[in-house]
Each structure stands twice: as C-alpha cells, then as structure tokens.
Amino acid sequence: MKKFLQKIPEQVKRLSILLVVVVIVFIIATSLLTPKDFGLIGHFRASSVQNNANKKMQYAGQETCSDCHEDMWKTKNAGYHKNLSCEVCHGPSLNHVNEPDQFKPVKPKGRTFCPVCHEYNPSRPTGFPQIVTASHNPRKICITCHNPHNPTPPQTPKDCSACHAEISNAKSVSSHMDIPCTKCHKTSAKHRLSPREFLPTKPTQREFCGQCHSKEAKSDESIPRINMTTHEPRYVCWQCHYPHLPEAQ
Amino acid sequence: MEELIQHLTPILKEIWGYIFPNEIELHWGILIVLYPYLTGLVAGAFILASLVKVFNVKELQPTYRLAMLTAMSFLIVAPLPLLAHLGHPEKAYEILITPNSASAMAMFGFVYAWYLMAVLCLEIWFEYRRDIILWSQKETGIKKWIHKIVSLFSKDISEKAIHFDKKWVKIITIIGIPSAFLLHGYVGFIFGSVKANPWWSSVLMPIVFLFSAIVSGIAMVLVLYMIITPIRGKQLDILCLDKLASYLFYVMIIDFSLEALDFVQRVYESEESIKILAYLVSNKLFISLVVIQLFMGMLIPLTMIALIKIFKSPPDLKKMVYFISAILVQVGIFSTRWNIVIGGQLFSKSFRGLTVYKITFFGLEGFFSAVVIFCLPFIILYILTKILPPWEEVRNP
C-alpha cells in the first residue's frame, strides 16, 4: 500500500485532496441548502403549494354573485356575454361578498373598457362585433345604448357592412362595387339577429358567375368574358377568383 | 401603469403590420446578446490554445498562455449577463443543488462548472505548476503566499513530475476540445431548439455558433497580443501573427460557408415564414446584418487578409491589416449575436408584422451595464497576468 501511494505523483495527491474537499463542500452545501420539502410531489418545494394557497383571495367567482344577483346572472348567461365571468368587467369582488355595503364592485363606465374586446382589429374573427371608437358615436359612453348583461345591438344592423366591414371596404374599391351583397348571398332576415345559426348562402354553380362573364352573356361589353366549357371546368369560380375584389391576384 | 404606457407609446408608433400584444416589447435585450458573444470568445480562445498543445503549431506558442488566461477571464464573466438579466443572482446556486435534468438551461450550470474546473483551471494549473513553484521560491510577502496557495503547496519539480505535467496538459486539452464545443454548441442549441421561431430553429445553429466563436476567439487573442506586446515594450512575433491570421482566415471561410449554406437552405425551403424574414433582413436588420456582419465583419477582413497573403507585404503593413481585420471581426461577430438574439424577436409569430428594439441606457438591462460587463474580463485578465504572467521571458528555463 505504501509503495502504491509513493508511486502516485505529488500533483495528483494534491489535486485529489482538493477534489475531495470540493465534493464534500458540495455535498454539505446541497444537504444544508436544499429545502427539506423539495421534490416530495414534483420538482419544487411542496410547501410552495401551501404558500400560494395562503395568499389573500380576491375573486369570488360568478356562482357566488348569482346568490344575490340571480336575475342579472340569468340574463347574462342567456346572452352573448355568457362566456364572461361577472368579475371580468366588475373586477375582483370578494370584499363585496364579505361586506356588501362597504365595498362596491367597479362598473366600467367610460369608452375605454369595452373596446378592449370590441375595437376594430383585423385579426378578430369576421362577424365579431367591432367598432372604430373614433367614429362610433364618439361622445357617448357604451352603456347608454348597450346593455352589457344582454349586449344585443340596440338596432338590428341595417347594412352588411355593420359587421363585415373588411369585406365591404374591399368590395367598395372593386369592379363589383355596384353589385349588392344579396345578389350572390341569399340571406335570411334572421341572420341579423342570430348570425351564426342562419348563415348566408354562397354561389355553388359556375353558371352563376357565367350570367355576366360567359361568352354568351348579354352583359356590358367591358366585362371580362371566358369560355365556360374550356376555362378550368372542374372548379367553382370563387375557388380561384376572390369575388369581393376580383382584381386581386 | 403610466410608466409602462410612456415606455410603450414610442414603440407602438414604429410597429409595422400586425403583431400580437405580447410581442411589442422584446424580452431578451442587449445582455442576452452579450452572453453568447462572451461564451464564444471563451470557446474560441481555448480552441486557439489547443492548436499549440494538440496540433503542435509551434508558431503560436507566444499566445498559448495568453489565450488560456483570456478564456479564463471571459468564462468567469460569461454568466454575469444572465444573472443580471434574470435579476435574482442570490438564487443562482439553486440550479446546482436542485438540478432539473429536463431543462437545457439548468444543465448548462454543469457544463459551465465542468469547463471552468475540469478543463480550464486544471490545464492552467498543470501548465503553470513548475513556474509557480520557482517563482514562489524567489518571491517574498503576499505574492509568495498567493503562488504557494495557487500551486497547492506543491514542491516537486523533478524531471519526472514535469513530464507528467506536460502529458496531462495534452490530455486535458484533448478533453477540452469537445468540452469547448459543448460549451458553445450548447448556446447555439438553446436558440436552435426554439421550434416556434423560424429565425432560430435550425439544426445548423450550434455549428454556426461554434465556428463564429472560434473566429471571434482567435481575433480577440490577436488583438490582445498586438496591444499588450508593444505596451510591454517587446517586439511582436511576426511569424506568430502570420499564423494567427492564417487560422483566422481559414475558420472565417468555414464560418462564411456555413452561414451561406444556412441562408441558401432557408431560401430554397421557402417555408411560410420566408416573406417576413426577407422583410426583416432587408429592413430592420439591413445595417446590422448586411452592412456590419456580412461586409464589415466578414468580406472586408477576408479580402484584406487574402490580399496581404497573395502580395508579399512589408511587416508593418501586415500588422496594421491584421489588427484592423481582427477589430472588424469582433464588431462583426458581436453583430452576428445581435442579429440572432434581437432579430429573432423582432417579427411577429403571426408572420404579419415587425416590432422594434429600444435599448435603454441605464438600469440593470441597459447599455451601460452591458458595457461594464464587457469591460470586466479585461480587468480580470489584467489581474490574472499579474498572478500568472503569460510572457515568454518570465518562464523559467
């Protein structure tokens, strides 16, 4: 053994001592610094769950609201805002539940809160009610005309453009600008009230566009013509041409 | 709230197209640009040092120890930008004592520790051991004790022990090359594995990072050598400079080819992101990518070094060209990191819009703190050269 130890170079001995010291320090540091409850239920301190649970509650939850405001809650759940919880608009209100007279929930009164969802934004889905606040009754606050618990429009929309502004804007600069929407889309009157349940139709036959664009059509001479039998006979026209702006490539 | 609005209002005016609300402000700023830049210098300087020991490039001997100390001083500072960015440096030890093996970022703590302790410290120790012992014998006072402690009170300077040291320097360097690749390859991996970001997500990313790291490391040692030597009143070794410049040239060619390959592949694949990326490159990143990274940082130094090599030039002209090229390369590589880190956050994941990066001057994540962190390695290098002088003339015969 002594011979074996003598054979080990001096440097290795010294480095080994250093390595052993580093490893021991690391092991001691790990055992001292790792929280006792670390890793019991996952890669975190088990007590952090309790720490979070101990935080002061802020929200009451809409079921609690319904205990006292059942009528309003039912109205809301029957309307378009059924997916919004009361505290989305009225703010965290647990204080109000505990001491109804002392704490009153907020009511968004101005013109800034509703546009968080309803300001015009091209990435929002078509048909989602959107306005441009600068031009939409600029001096009125939203809730004078709209009931937020049952937010159906105060008047049924008169024009298609009220909801389909983007399409309407595109069509207004195209050669189809004079064609009314209803020429191509048969639209039930109920679409205005329940837009998603009563969808408008779309032309399904090539002959529909052919009324103006086929060689035989009796339309204005300036309208572009095609041979209906040879021009891509297997496709409906709007699969290739965008009818709201046919000039677009 | 007011502060936030004031901060975001000027940015909102410069947004182009449509972007998601959480993309307006960049989450990774100049500190995260600095981090891969500093780590790259470490890996590059180490690879340069390994040329001497493993590949026996004798001409580079004057820069060997300097390169090792440079790698060391930059490695010590490399995690600082991350600590400053995350904002809780007092919690940093937690990633070591409660390691999460599923997190690439957490595992980096171990890659870093391995590289610092098992590679750099050990190699420097074996390389310097004999000299430290001899220095401590001649010295008095605090310097003697520093050297005694650094040498771990080792005394053996027999022929056999020196031979053992030399053998281990070589072995550690051989282990160190894949370790250096791992260290900086990891940084590329972190970006390359972000699947949702088409600017980053590329298998080539770790390799491109690695080669640009080697380029920057060689250039940094070249600059340091050319600045320090005249300050010390010594002559520059022109053979060493020629060799450094040659290696810089070769690695830059590889780096350039890899980046060109990445570019061609992206253009050929033409995934749905190509339009926004093309717009990004031709607008927001035009100056930093095309002008600084490509022309100033790559093509001009390549051409200058090539011309110097083709036409036999006087040594003074050579030195000037090498120095300017190395500085340009530094600027170019910093720009590369900038374009990757900042560029990857400038476009919307909707591929329909671009935002802008407004750098702040003060604050933990500002320009000023980046400058301070960038200066630190040079101060550490100065201290290290006082404790472990890398100069040829102080080596004991």
Image (cartoon, coloured by chain):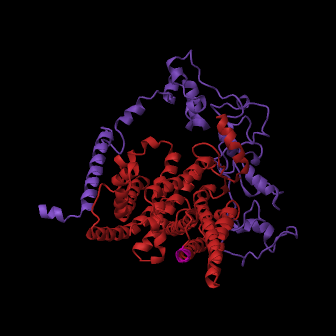
Q: Nearer the viewer, residue A71 or B8?
A: B8
Q: Residue furthest right?
A: A221
- Residue B304 position, x and y percent, is 65, 76
B163 horizontally vs B188: left or right: left
Magenta: main secondary structure equals: helix
Q: Residue A2: in sight, yes or no? A: yes
The residue sitting at 40% across, 32% down in the picture is: A51
Judged from this view, the residue extending furthest toward the left is A1
Q: Quadrant of residue A100?
A: top right
* Residue A144 drawn above or below residue B376: above
In front: A172, or B336?
B336
In the image, A116 versus A246, the foreground residue is: A116
Q: Is residue B193 visible?
A: no
Q: Which quadrant is the C terminus of chain B positioned in? A: bottom left
Q: Colour of chain B?
A: red
Depth check: give the residue in front, B300 or B202. B300
Q: What span is colored magenta in the figure?
A: B237-246
Up/down of B108 relative to B363, above or below: below
Q: Is residue A135 magenta?
A: no
Name the residue: 34% across, 38% down: A46
Q: Which chain is purple?
A: A
Name which quarter of the figure residue B126 lies in: bottom left
What's the residue at 38%, 59% (across, down)?
Answer: B135
Residue B391: percent from the left, percent from the top?
A: 47, 65
Farthest residue in the bottom direction? B311
- Vertical arrangement, residue B340 with respect to residue A68, above or below: below
Query: Which quadrant does the N terminus of chain B fall into?
Result: top right
Image location (x, y in percent) of residue B183: 44, 62
